Image (spheres, rainbow, N blue to C red):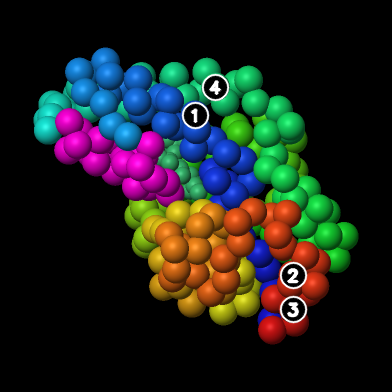
């Protein structure tokens, strides 16, 4: 069966984590508390709802359902004010070369992201039409580490999970890929992403030989 590659978005193709951090931190500050960059690591790959639950927990706060939803809306508006200024210069180093290689060799490629803003971001960075399949936070009911997002991507790519390779920057995403029995490639720190099959600091460390080996496996 055809091999296919699934890319997470935030932290793999672009560094939107820095904008999520600014927007979540403003929300916490407006509610009267703060959290650290280290705590922010725990929000990577986690859905919007689960992120706000964690943040409120750090601030020992509870909100009514209505206020919870209002705060999520405010955070997203603030986050989108950063996203709206993005362009293709935000694509992380090494990513365009790998995408071009895969497209030239007709390897099916997908985005598998927890973000409900994934399509907006892909349009801003001019990559929306490059992917055969996009599965995002609007298409799933279960957040990573549940493998739903990657399993839907495999199905839409018309291949089996074992033939999929996932590039992910979050622990939850690596766990999701492993549960789906896909090959998991971590982008980030080895000691954080130690459950991944392979880990690279970023795409500049990945050469075409490695990609070819993955596709032959
Ligand atoms: P949104 P990914 C994830 O994207 C982010 O890593 C995570 O920090 C964010 O909370 C989540 O998307 C939801 O994002 O608020 O835009 O729907 O890494 O799975 O591409
Ligand atoms: Mg990510």
* Residue assigned mark 3: 213
Cα–Cα span, label 2 and label 4 = 33 Å
Q: Is mark 1 within 8 Å of ligand 1?
A: no
Magenta stretch: includes residue 154 = no
CA gap, disc 1 to disc 2?
30 Å
Q: Which residues are magenta?
A: 37-59
Q: Earlier in the sequence, mark 4 or mark 3?
A: 4
Q: Which residue is mark 4?
A: 82
Sooner in the amino-acid sequence: mark 4 or mark 1: 1
Element assignment for label 3: helix
Residues at circles 4 and 1 in contact by the CB criterion of under 8 Å = yes
The Cα atoms of the two marked residues, 1 and 3, are separated by 35 Å
User: How far across and how far down the image is residue 111, in percent?
Assistant: 60, 52
Q: Is residue 67 left or right of residue 8?
A: left
In the picture of the structure, the residue carrying the numbered disc 2 is 211
Instruction: Work out which quarter of the rendered image holds the C terminus and state it.
Output: bottom right
Residue toward you, 128 or 215: 215
Q: Earlier in the sequence, mark 1 or mark 3?
A: 1
Q: Secondary structure at mark 1?
A: helix
Is 154 positioned to the left or the right of 137 in the image?
Answer: right
For the N terminus, the image quarter is bottom right
Is residue 169 in view? yes
Q: Identify the element where label 2 is drawn.
A: helix
Q: Residue at x 53, y 74 (%)?
A: 197
| Residue at x-position 60% and y-position 21% | 84
> Secondary structure under badge 4?
helix
Q: Residues within 10 Å of mark 3 (few under 14, many from 20)?
A: few
Image disc number at residue 156: none
Q: Ligand 2 near label 3 (Cβ, under 8 Å)? A: no
Q: Which residue is mark 1?
A: 19
What is the residue that sits farthest to the bottom in this orientation? 217
The numbered mark, 1 or 2, whose residue comes first in the sequence reads 1
């Amino acid at each position: 069966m055809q091999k296919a590659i699934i890319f997470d978005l935030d932290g793999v193709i672009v560094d939107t984590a820095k904008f999520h951090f600014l927007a979540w931190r403003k929300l916490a500050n407006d509610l009267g508390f703060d959290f650290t960059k280290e705590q922010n690591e725990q929000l990577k790959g986690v859905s919007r709802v689960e992120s706000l639950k964690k943040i409120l927990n750090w601030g020992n706060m509870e909100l009514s359902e209505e206020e919870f939803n209002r705060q999520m809306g405010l955070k997203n508006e603030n986050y989108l004010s950063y996203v709206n200024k993005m362009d293709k210069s935000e694509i992380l180093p090494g990513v365009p070369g790998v995408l071009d290689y895969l497209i030239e060799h007709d390897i099916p490629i997908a985005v598998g992201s927890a973000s409900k803003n994934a399509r907006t971001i892909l349009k801003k960075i001019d990559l929306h039409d490059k992917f055969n399949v996009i599965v995002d936070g609007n298409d799933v009911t279960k957040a990573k580490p549940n493998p739903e997002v990657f399993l839907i991507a495999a199905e839409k790519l018309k291949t089996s999970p074992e033939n999929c390779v996932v590039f992910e920057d979050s622990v939850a995403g690596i766990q999701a890929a492993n549960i789906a029995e896909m090959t998991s490639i971590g982008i980030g720190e080895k000691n954080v992403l130690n459950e991944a099959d392979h880990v690279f600091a970023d795409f500049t460390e990945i050469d075409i030989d490695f990609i070819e080996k993955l596709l032959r496996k």
